[in-house]
Amino acid sequence: MTDADFHAPDSEEPTTALDHVTIENDDAPDECAIFPYDASEDELMTAWISAYDGSFVALESMR
């Protein structure tokens, strides 16, 4: 797959701004919680992604 094979559709819709926080756990790997920047407290209960050490790769390695 090349960059030419992937093209995100052009859209006038705004993208969602994301924020993150690192959660340090004593008895488990630390985790990074990623969530919408302007999420309400109720939305934060369900609108998040959790990533652990080892879940990340360099962008260049995926191109």
Image (cartoon, helix red, strand yellow):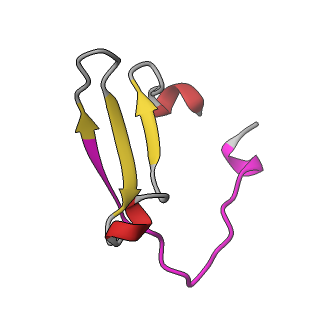
Quadrant location of the N terminus?
top right
Residue 39: x, y in percent? Answer: 36, 69
On screen, residue 45 versus residue 31, left or right, reads right
Residue stretch in magenta: 3-21
Residue 45: x, y in percent? Answer: 42, 58
Examine the structure image and report whether residue 4 is included in the region drawn in magenta. Answer: yes
Q: How many marks?
A: 0
Q: Which residue occupies 40% across, 69% down?
A: 42
Q: Which residue occupies 25% across, 37% down?
A: 22
Residue 60: x, y in percent? Answer: 49, 30
Q: Above or below — where is 17 with respect to 52? A: below
Of residues 23 and 26, which is closer to you in this image? Answer: 26
Residue 20: x, y in percent? Answer: 30, 49
What secondary structure prevails in the magenta region? loop
Examine the structure image and report whether residue 50 is included in the region drawn in magenta. Answer: no
- Which residue is situated farthest in the bottom direction here? 12
Which quarter of the figure has residue 35?
bottom left
Q: Which residue occupies 22% across, 28% down?
A: 24
On screen, residue 21 versus residue 46, left or right, reads left
Q: Which residue occupies 45% across, 52% down?
A: 48
Quadrant location of the C terminus?
top right
